[in-house]
Amino acid sequence: MHFLVRLTILPPIALVLSLWALPAAPTSPVAGAANGDPADPLRYGRRDDVMRFADEVAQRHNLDVAWVRAALERARFTPAVARLIMPAASGTAKNWAAYRSRFVEPIRIRAGLAFWRNHQRWLDAAEARFGVPPEVVVGIIGVESIFGQHTGTFRVIDALATLAFDFPTGRKDRTPFFRDELEAFLLMCHQGGQEPLAVKGSYAGAIGMPQFLPSSVNKYAVDFDGDGAIDLKDSPADVIGSVANYMAQFGWQRGMPTRFDVTPPSSTTERALLLVPDIVPSFSAQEMLQRGATLGSAGQTFDGKLALVELQNGDAAPSFVAGTPNFYAITRYNWSSYYALAVIELGEAIAQERARAAR
C-alpha cells in the first residue's frame, strides 16, 4: 500500500495552534544557512542543524540518508508561514456568532449537499464500519476545506521546515511538535514514493480534503475504496473513511448525541464550578441539575458524563451547550469548542437541506 497524498486554507488547525502561548527565540534562517545556496538565501541548504536532523531521521527509520538530506536541502524558509502561525492580536474577543457565520453558510451548505449526494455510498459505509454519522463526517470536511475547494498552496516541506527550524518569537515555541511532523512527512513521502517538494498543503503543514497533519496521515488514513492507495486529495472514499476512522480512534460512540440544550446556573459560583473542567465531560445530568443547570428532557435522561461548554459572543451574552463525550471527540480533531459546534451545526444544516430537498 502507498500514500497518494499529492496534495495541495488555512485549516481550522490554525485554531488549535492559536491556543499555544508565548515565546522562544529561533535561529535566523539566513544567518544559519551560511553553507547554503548563495543564490537562494532562504533555502535551508546544508545548515548544520538541519543536516543533523536529516541524519537522525534517516537512522531512526532506516531511510536513505542522501534522499532525506536532498529533500531538506531544497526546503525554503517561508516568511508567510512564520507570519500566519502567529496568534490573533491580543484583545480580540471570541465571538461564537461571528465564528459560526464563517462556516454555516450557503457556499458550504450547497457544496455539502452535492458531496453527500455524490458520495452517499461511502458515507453510509463509513457509518456502518466506524459508527460516525454522515453529518459529522460531512461537517468536518466542509469546515476543513469546503470539500476540497481550499486545501492549501504551500509546499508542505517548506511550511514544516520553517516551523521546525525557525519557529517565530512571540508565542510558545512549538519546534518539537513541528520537527515531529516534518519527520512524519518525510516518512510518509518515502513510504508512498512521493516527491517531498511536490506535496502542497496549509501553512501549518495540513494535507488534503480532511487537512490531516502528516502524523495523522500515517496513523489514521485508510484506503477505504480498496484500490491499494491512500489518496486524501482526489479520493472522497478515502477521505470519508479516514475522517470516520480518526473520530472512532478518538472515542466516538455510535448513536450518542453530541450535545444538549442547557441553561447554566444563575449562581456564578455554581456556574464557575461546572466550567472548571472546560470541554471535558465530567458531570452526570443529575450533578448538573443539582448545581442549578437546566436541561431538557433528553439531557436529563442522558446516561453519561456531560460538560458545560461556554462559547463567548463578544459583548453579548455567551452561549452554552451540554457537551457529551462525542462533542469532546470532535474537539480531538481540533481542540476548540467553537470548531466542534461549527462542525456539528454545519452538518445538521446540510442534513436539513437534504431532507427538505427530498420532500
Image (cartoon, helix red, strand yellow):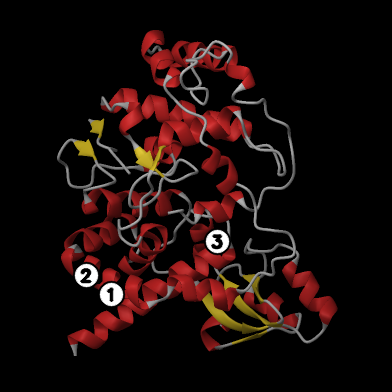
Q: Residue furthest bottom?
A: 359
Q: Which mark is residue 110?
A: 1
Q: Which mark is residue 286?
A: none
Q: Position of residue 323 (x, y in %)?
A: 57, 70
Q: Position of residue 247 (x, y in %)?
A: 42, 54
Element under disc 1? helix
* Mark 3, other Cα within 10 Å: few <14 / some 14–19 / many ≥20: many
Q: Residue at x 40, y 76 (%)?
A: 105
Q: CA distance from mark 1 to mark 3?
A: 27 Å
Q: Is residue 96 above or below residue 261?
A: above
The quarter of the picture where the N terminus appears is top left
Which residue is tagged 2?
A: 114
Q: Is residue 42 above or below residue 48?
A: below
Of the two numbered discs 1 and 3 in the rendering, the one whose residue sits closer to the viewer: 1
Which kind of residue does numbered mark 2 sit on? Ala
Q: CA distance from mark 2 to mark 3?
A: 28 Å
Q: CA distance from mark 1 to mark 2?
A: 6 Å
Q: Are marks 1 and 2 in contact (CB under 8 Å)?
A: yes
Which residue is tagged 3?
A: 328
Element under disc 2? helix
Q: Residue at x 63, y 37 (%)?
A: 174
Upstream in the sequence, badge 2 or badge 3?
A: 2
Which kind of residue does numbered mark 1 sit on? Arg
Element under disc 3? helix
